[in-house]
Structure formats: C-alpha cells, structure tokens
Amino acid sequence: MNKKLAALSSFAFLLLNAGVAHTEDAKPAPSAFPPPVVSDPLLAPPPAAARKVEGLADAVQLLRARSADLRFAYLEVARAEAQSRSALAALLPQLNGQAGVTHQLITRDTLQASGQTLKTPAENSASLGFTASQSVFSLPLLRARTNAKMNEEVQRLSLEDQKRALLSGVVTTVVAVSTAERIADLNRSGLRSALERLEIARTKERLGSANTLDTKRAEQDVESARSQVVNGDESLRQAREALALAVGLTGEMGVGAGMEPAVLMADTARLCTAVGTVEERADIRSQEQHVELAVRAIDDVKAQFVPTVGLSSSLQTSASTVTVSAPTTWSVGANLVIPIWDGGNRYGLIHSAEAVAEENRVTLDATKRGVVTAAAQSRRAVDVALDARAVALRAQKLATEIDLLVQTTYRIGSGTSLDLVTAATAKRQADINLALADFAVARARLTDSLTLAACKY
C-alpha cells in the first residue's frame, strides 16, 4: 500500500511539473484536480470609490483648484508682489490734498476805520491746499525696493518647490491606491483558495481519510484569510481617503486606467523637467536667496546711518467772510535729515541681523546635505527595489509551486493538514510581498524622477 501511495505521489509530482510554464511573471499552471465550488460574502469585490482620478491631468487640475498648500503658495507670491509695489511707491512722488470748512460759534463785532463793522473771527471760512513731496536720495528706501524684488523671486521659487512636492505626494498616493486594490484582490483569491482547501478537508473527513484536526486547521486558515480581506479592505479605504486629501477633497477617491505606473511616469515627465545639480533645485535656490536677503539686512541697518534728502512743495488757498479776496500761498522746500544718535538701537539691529544671516547659512548647508543624501538614496532605491522585486518574484513562484504540490499530495492521501495550511499561508504572503515589491519599484522610480526636478503646472 505504501509503495502504491508513493508511486501515485511521484506521478502527481511529474504531472504537476509538466504543466508549469516558467515565464517572467507567469504562475504555475493550476492543478489537474478541479477546485470545489465555494462561496462567501467576503469574496465579493470591495465597493468602488464614488470618484476616480482618470489621469494625472485630472489630479493636477484638482490640485490647482483645491489644494490649500498650493493656494497658500500662490497667495505668498501675490503678497510679495504687493510688498514690492509698496516699496516702489515710497520712491515715487507723493501728492496729498487738504480741504476744510470752519464755522465759528462765538464771534464779536469789530468796527473798522472805514466805519464798516466786521465779525471776528470770520464766521465762516474755507481752505484748500495741496502738498507734494519727493524723496531725492534715501538709501534705506532704495534697498527696500531691491529687497522686495528679491523676495518676489524667493516666493516664486517656493511655489515651484511646493508644486514638485505636491505632485510627488499625489503620484505616490496613486500608486499606493493601485497597490491596495491589487492586495485586496489577492486577499480574496487567498480566501477562495482557503475555502477550497476547507471543502477538500471536509470531503476527506466524510470519506474517512482525514480527521477533525485536519478540518479545524483548514477552518483556522479560512478565518486567517478572512481577517486579511477585512484588513486589506480597510487599508484600501484609507489609501483612497489619502488620495482624496492629497488633491484637496474628502471621502474616497479611486484611480482609473490612466494612472498606471508606466502612464504616470510618462505624464510626470511632461510636467516636470530634471535639473542638473542639487543647487538648481527650487528649494535650494530659495534658501540661497534667503541667505542673500539676510546678509543684505545687515547693510540695510547700516544704511540708516546715511543722511536722506527730500523735496516738498505746498500750495494753500483760503476764503472767509472777513477778507474780500482769497489769499493763496505756494512754497517749495528741501530737507536734509542727518541721523546722529538713537540710543544705540541701530547697533543692536546690526548684531541681530548678523545672527539671522548666520542662521540662514546653517540652514542652507543642512538643506543641501539633506537634498544630496535624498538624491543619492532615490537613485539607489530604484536598484534596491528592482533587486527586492526579483527576490519576491522567485519567492512567489516557489510558494505557488509548493502550495500546488502540497494540495496535490494531500488530495491523494500524502502530507498533513499542517503542511497544507503552512503552504497556503506562505503563498498568500508571497503574493502580497510581490505586490508590495511592485509598489516599491513604481514609487522608487517616480520619487527618483521628482527628487531633482522642476515642475510647471
């Protein structure tokens, strides 16, 4: 009997290996035994998301319309432009007008030499005047205008880097959603296989070739597979919610066919161009501008020691019931302001500005080191992810083959239920590991393409 059983096992092994097709990502052929019919509520696919992002263009459109971070970056640019205009206004001529009407409640009659009686002061009077001023030379105002223009550039660079960071977050979240959907399908496939093995164990128990322990182990495996389905569906919901948040919405958002990793790479390449060096990345350029502005702030304080020159002109006219004609005056003047002593306030401001400049230099140095390291890691991460995927693929093939062999030998009476459950668990985990490895490859490639890039959208 044992020799017959061994012969059947050997025949099953040869039959199984003869039906295995070894291609790059092909799975071994299914067993010759037809699987039993099984059903379970959890085998139904997860509910589809109410909304979908069909392509990267849709995601970018939502970012521009809904992203709070992008909106703040645009508002910072608008504020910098407004500050620049205000700095220019301080250098342009200033013109102000004044008008007034006065009615005196207490007056007295005054007899003039001509015999005419007048009320003094004048019961009613009116005045109209214009004052014009122009800064001829003010070093602080000139420097403030230059600083404001530099700050505009800083905010535009910050906006550019914000676009890169937001796009990187969106594409990574999109890949995460695709991976979660794939894992949800794998979990259901694993549950179906566990249910089929449970049905086989029950059939063998009814036929007397298996005991209750075999069935209980199969039931335990089914519950483990059900737990994976439940947890995987929750991970999918969270990934969809993260995608909705990334584009400025709430709820769940799925992905369409236009968001496959290969399509994402092509769309990302159209929106973003690679920069040659770390120093060309927008956040590094922005930080360098911050350092320059901080250094200029030291000279801005020193500029307050320089005298300023200005011109002013005033035209005034008034009319009252006392005078017959309206007296008009027009004056032109120049003023020179020489700073002499302010109690040492400017010296304190210089020391403060020097400290801020040094802080910005340290920040720039740290930022550069971080970007250099991130760039090196992103390039290395692609190779690491590809190597890890190759390992995961080989492990998944082995787990699939072992699972089929264990099922075959178990059906013909060889092997134990423990072998069956162990092989099934390893197979499910290997499938998930391969899906995660695919996600890691896609994420590494996208991250590497965006680490040193400038995005325009």
Image (cartoon, rainbow, N blue to C red):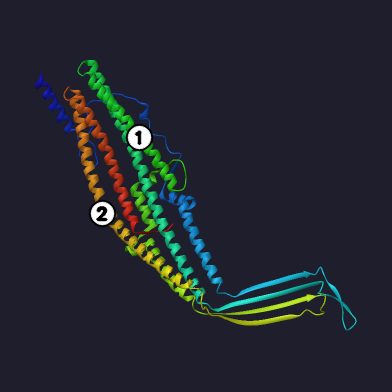
Residue 381's spot in the image, x, y percent? Answer: 27, 52
Question: Which of the 4 image quadrants contains residue 357?
Answer: bottom left
What's the CA distance linking mark 1 and mark 2? 32 Å
Residue to which mark 1 is pinned:
231
- Place of residue 60 in the rendered image (x, y in percent of width and height, measured from the top left): 44, 52
The quadrant in which the N terminus is found is top left
**For the residue labelled by badge 1, is the local secondary structure a helix, a strand or a loop?**
helix
Q: Which residue is mark 2?
A: 380
Query: Is residue 158 shown above or below 386?
Result: below
- The residue drawn where x is 33% and y is 61% is 366
How many badges with numbers are in the image? 2
* Residue 23 visible in rendering: no
Q: Is residue 77 left or right of residue 329?
A: left
Q: Residue furthest bottom?
A: 113
In this image, 64 relative to 189: left or right? Answer: right
Looking at the rendered structure, which numbered label has been put on residue 125?
none
Image quarter in which the C terminus is found: bottom left
Name the residue type under label 1: Asn
Asked whether residue 284 appears in the rendered view, the answer is yes
Find residue 361 and report its image quarter: bottom left
